[in-house]
């Protein structure tokens, strides 16, 4: 499963949870989160088309 499919699956899971939510505020927040996952899915293709930025420090070696 590529990143785009993963984000779309996460969005579907979140929208499903929103549909089951009784609290209106939580339902809205779940829907917003689902929308953000869909945005990330759309951005995957855009970021793959661009040149990657050189990052000399691997993400797992960074100090917080």
Image: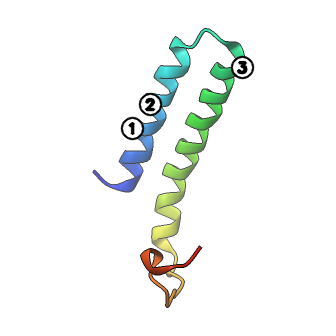
Callout 3: SS: helix
Tell me where residue 29 appears, x and y as whole percent. Answer: 66, 29
> Residue at the right extreme?
25
Tell me where residue 20 appears, x and y as whole percent. Answer: 51, 12
| Residue at image coords 56%, 35% | 34
The reply to whether callout 3 and callout 1 are in contact (CB within 8 Å) is no
* Label 1 packing within 10 angstroms: few (<14), some (14-19), many (20+): some
User: Mark 1 or mark 3, which is nearer the start of the sequence?
Assistant: 1
The image shows residue 48, relative to residue 8, as above or below, that is below
Which of the labelled discs sits on residue 9, or is there none?
Answer: 1
* Label 2 packing within 10 angstroms: few (<14), some (14-19), many (20+): some
The reply to whether callout 2 and callout 1 are in contact (CB within 8 Å) is yes
Residue beneath disc 2: 12
Callout 2: SS: helix
* Label 3 packing within 10 angstroms: few (<14), some (14-19), many (20+): few
Tell me where residue 9 appears, x and y as whole percent. Answer: 39, 38
Tell me where residue 6 appears, x and y as whole percent. Answer: 37, 46
Q: Is residue 28 left or right of residue 53?
A: right
Q: Give the Cα separation between the discs numbered 3 and 1.
A: 23 Å
| Residue at image coords 65%, 22% | 26
- Give whichever of 4, 17 is nearer the camera: 17
Q: Give the Cα separation between the discs numbered 3 and 2.
A: 19 Å
Which image quadrant is residue 58 in?
Answer: bottom left
User: Mark 2 or mark 3, which is nearer the start of the sequence?
Assistant: 2
Residue beneath disc 3: 25
The image shows residue 38, relative to residue 43, as above or below, that is above
Q: Is residue 9 left or right of residue 63?
A: left
């Amino acid at each position: 499963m590529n990143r785009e499919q993963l984000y779309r699956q996460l969005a579907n899971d979140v929208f499903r949870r929103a549909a089951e939510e009784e609290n209106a505020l939580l339902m809205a927040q779940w829907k917003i989160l689902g929308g953000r996952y869909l945005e990330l899915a759309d951005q995957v293709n855009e970021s793959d088309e661009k040149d990657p930025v050189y990052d000399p420090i691997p993400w797992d070696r960074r100090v917080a």
